[in-house]
Image (cartoon, helix red, strand yellow):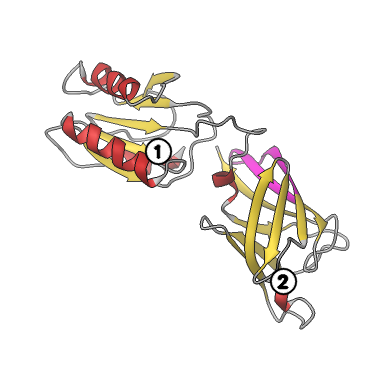
Amino acid sequence: MSVISLALLSGCVSHPTVFVYAKYLDKQQRLDLDHALTEEKFLVEFNQLDFPTTITENTILYSLLLDDPETLARAENLFAQLGVPINNIQGLTKGNHWYTKNSLALFIFPEQSRDHGVFKQDLAHVYQLQLSEGCNLEVDLELASNGKYRFIIDNPSAQIESYLIGDWLYRQYPYLELRPENAPYSSAYFEISKVLKEDQISKIDFTQLTVIESKVVPMGCVLQHGLRY
């Protein structure tokens, strides 16, 4: 998908470059990877891009134009020493992407198991309300990566103003909770689901939030965010 092409574009370098998709890594993990790769004479670039939907396990994607044929083996051994198991290794040979010479891309998932394909980090997006009978509001819901939420709505009524911002919580699949700012408990609940659809361009992987209880959006309404294959 296009996110790979963005990450793998680079100029000519004397050492192989490792593009680390670090969406699920904490600060210490990034520091450890950066130190270890730099010590082994790799150039390192981190990004926070979404993973391609076709990648579902720890993966190395590598350019077929590596200057040193031992580069891939060195990288794999290094990740093993760091306790990062690599489940899939594949050359960059398919799709409509432009791949640069002498580079690798590393995709690392969290150690904990993925619940039905949804990690907490996967939920940090802007969700649009799907218009239907009884759900004809102009409202979006933004879930920020720092754990904050906000409803984006024009001219909100005074009755809902105190519910428009706060913290979002993902304790257990498939439920998302919203706790308004300065409130001691959650007051909105959504059911998370995944839906795969297809249009004339490509397949789209949707994350949907169906309202169970909310002061802002009517019960049963659906907000969704889509990621193209």
Residue at 39% across, 35% down: 97
Task: Return the residue found at the far left.
Answer: 14
Residue at 20% across, 16% down: 70
**Is any part of residue 3 visible from this angle?**
yes
Residue at 76% across, 83% down: 158
59 on left or right of 131: left
Q: Was residue 89 drawn as part of the magenta stretch in this picture?
A: no
With respect to residue 209, does 71 lie above or below?
A: above
The residue under label 1 is 4
Q: CA distance from mark 2 to mark 1?
A: 38 Å
Residue 36 percent coordinates (x, y): 24, 32
Q: Amino acid at mark 1?
A: Ile
Magenta region: 191-209
110 on left or right of 142: left
Residue 105 percent coordinates (x, y): 34, 32
With respect to residue 29, does 75 lie above or below?
A: above
Q: How many other residues sit within 10 Å of disc 2, few (<14), some (14-19) or many (≥20)?
A: many
**Disc on res. 173:** none
Secondary structure of the residue carrying tag 1 is: helix
**Is any part of residue 151 visible from this angle?**
no
Q: Of the residues under marks 2 and 1, which one precedes in the sequence?
A: 1
